[in-house]
Image: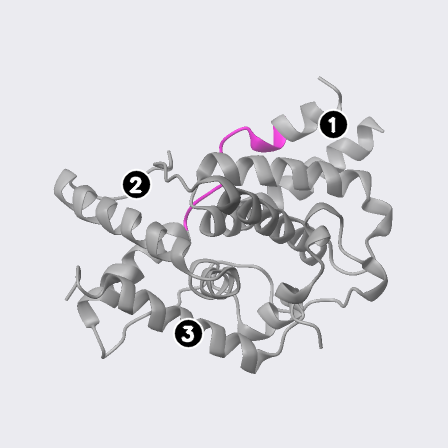
């Protein structure tokens, strides 16, 4: 069993970054994203015998469902936004300030989108997936996903254009 | 074909149905640059592009795998 856990650790290391980006994009919270990933990987470990296709696609669906579950619950209570603790990567404090504002604005605008549009936008533009890959992961058509991304971009533009004209 | 959002909400707390699972496309999960430049509002989309580019470099918190493995070990 310990050997299984060690091997599973390699899978966690391999896929946790891209899954973290998805969960962060969907929830807007680094803490929530980590919690969802942790629960998802533990669930995946206990159901490893059920994997028939690729592990990364299978665990993605667990994480994506965890995000949607969290969104349903949080909308019943309240929405809060918090700063993530990721390194900013900006060169000067001024740039950090400007970009920090966009970070918050984009989080708020994404939170205002329907889940399916947010999911499509995050997968396309934050995770950098192809439409074909998205279609497989979400069990949707490429055409439907292109429409969701297009509608997400239109909605984001409406929500943000006054501040960035 | 059933879209993801139409699935039973209880799917959020259970593992995927592996009986109907299809293998994903061969293209791997990988960081790829996806420019968002738009002629409708270049300033806005340049700002969004910069922020999404930052997010494409985000990583899971340090020690994440070790914390999951510790939970699995019952520690």
Residue at 45% from the left image edge and 72% from the top image edge: A149
Residue pointed to by mark 1:
B72
B61 falls in the magenta region: yes
Q: Bounds of the magenta span?
A: B57-66
Residue A45 falls left or right of residue A106:
right
Q: Which mark is residue A88?
A: 2
Residue A150: horizontal and vertical position, in percent? 41, 76
Cβ atoms at labels 1 and 3 below 8 Å apart: no
Measured along the vertical axis of the image, is residue A18 above or below residue A81? below
Residue A135 falls left or right of residue A97:
right
Q: Are marks 1 and 3 on the same chain?
A: no
Number of labels in the image equals 3
Quadrant where the image shows the N terminus of chain A: top right
Secondary structure of the residue carrying numbered label 1 = helix
How many C-alpha atoms fall within 10 Å of the one at disc 3: few (<14), some, or many (≥20)? some
Secondary structure of the residue carrying numbered label 3 = helix
Residue B13: horizontal and vertical position, in percent? 71, 46
Quadrant where the image shows the C terminus of chain A: bottom left
Label 1 vs label 3: CA separation? 41 Å
Residue B36 falls left or right of residue A120:
left
Prevalent SS, magenta region: loop
Q: Circle 1 marks a residue in which chain?
A: B
Cβ atoms at labels 2 and 3 below 8 Å apart: no
Residue at 68% from the left image edge and 36% from the top image edge: A9
């Amino acid at each position: 069993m310990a050997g299984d856990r060690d091997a599973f650790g390699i899978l966690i290391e391999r896929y946790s970054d891209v899954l973290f980006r998805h969960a962060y994009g969907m929830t807007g919270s680094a803490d929530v994203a980590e919690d969802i990933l942790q629960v998802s990987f533990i669930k995946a470990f206990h159901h490893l015998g059920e994997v028939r296709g690729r592990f990364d696609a299978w665990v993605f669906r667990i994480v994506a469902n965890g995000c949607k579950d969290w969104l349903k619950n949080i909308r019943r209570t309240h929405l809060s936004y918090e700063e993530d603790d990721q390194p900013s990567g900006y060169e000067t404090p001024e740039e950090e300030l400007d970009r920090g504002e966009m970070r918050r604005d984009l989080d708020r605008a994404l939170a205002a989108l329907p889940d399916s549009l947010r999911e499509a936008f995050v997968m396309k533009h934050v995770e950098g997936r192809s439409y074909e890959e998205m279609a497989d992961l979400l069990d949707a058509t490429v055409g439907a996903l292109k429409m969701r991304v297009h509608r997400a971009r239109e909605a984001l533009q409406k929500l943000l254009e006054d501040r960035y004209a | 074909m059933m879209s993801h959002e139409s699935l039973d909400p209880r799917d959020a707390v259970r593992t995927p149905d592996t009986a109907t699972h299809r293998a994903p496309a061969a293209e791997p999960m990988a960081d790829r640059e996806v420019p968002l430049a738009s002629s409708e509002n270049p300033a806005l989309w340049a700002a969004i592009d910069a922020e999404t580019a930052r997010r494409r470099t985000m990583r899971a918190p340090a020690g994440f795998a070790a914390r999951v493995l510790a939970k699995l070990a019952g520690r």
